[in-house]
Image (spheres, rainbow, N blue to C red):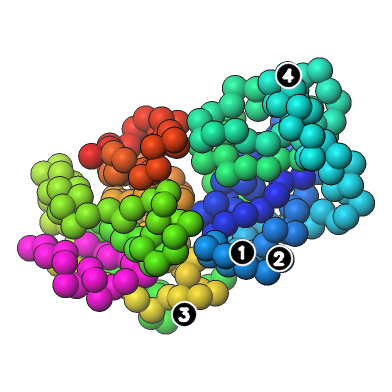
Amino acid sequence: MIIVKLMGGLGNQMFQYAAGRCLSHLHKTNLQMDLSFLNKNSMEGITKRKFGLDCFELNLKEANESDIAGYKKKMGNKYIRTFQRKLPILFDSVYFAESGSTFHKEFYNLPAKVYLEGYWQCEKYFLPVEEVIQKDFCFKKALDAKNENLMSKIKNSVSVSLHVRRGDYISASHTSNIYAPCSAEYYNSAVEIIASKVSNIELFIFSDEIHWCKENLKFSWQVNYIDNNSNKNNYIDMQLMSACKHNVIANSSFSWWAAWLNNNPNKIIIAPAKWYSASHLSDSDLIPDKWLRI
């Protein structure tokens, strides 16, 4: 059995699920989700998140206390954690905690009984089963009339999504110490690059601060501001972005996944050159090779 601890928003939960799904598929064993962290009261400085994977057609099972109990002793001993992380092949049951933000090559030596704790923000953790992941992350609910009209417009134009993440990147100290919002110059440069490669583009801007976008992002192309999906329906923004022909993403796992799920074989994806403002974190394994960083 593979157990995955879920943390963070929808994009983070997707990375965590994908890593666990890869191992469960390769080992032909069950996958369960540990929701205990999401169910806790909000910690100071950390944005409270809810379980978000129910927007997909997934047959998910929640791990209970007895499922997790066998790993708890290993969680509390840093020497066991380090030893298991370095040489997981020596164990038949492993608590595997992510250390740092780069790809752990030991991941594929993990046994069929493992508890995963981390963010796993790298497609290398699930590339062997990428077709499975694409199929799993199929949005299950029908769109309402307004979003259906937007989807039609996106599919019938040379659509380019821009995701502008601000919100807790500015207001929450825990988050703002790790991330800084992308600048207007970044979005202007990204759109110019795409416009130099394809003609007649139409922009679709998604943001948690649409008013900032209207005041600070000025383009000569047709622009659509999307602000009708919030709270429990925010996943629809990811669905709409993934249907765009091309994507300009923020330093956000939410728009990372929108771009990754984009099935246009000729897609142009532009990502920020600097993902983290925190110097101790590396983004060297985070962005797929075919995407352009500026």
- Mark 3 and mark 4: Cα distance apart in space: 50 Å
Q: Which mark lies nearer to you, 2 or 4?
A: 2
For image coordinates 74% across by 32% down, the residue present is 78
Answer above or below: position of 237 versus 276. Answer: below
Q: Which residue is mark 1?
A: 43
Quadrant of the image containing the C terminus? top left
Amino acid type shown at disc 2: Lys
Residue 144 bears which disc, if any? 3
Amino acid type shown at disc 1: Met
Residue 66 in picture, x, y percent from top left: 92, 51
Amino acid type shown at disc 4: Leu
Element type at marker 4?
Answer: loop
Answer above or below: position of 71 versus 161. Answer: above
Cβ–Cβ below 8 Å for labels 3 and 1? no
Residue 40 bears which disc, if any? 2
Counting residues from the N terminus, which is met first, the one under dot 3 or under dot 1? 1
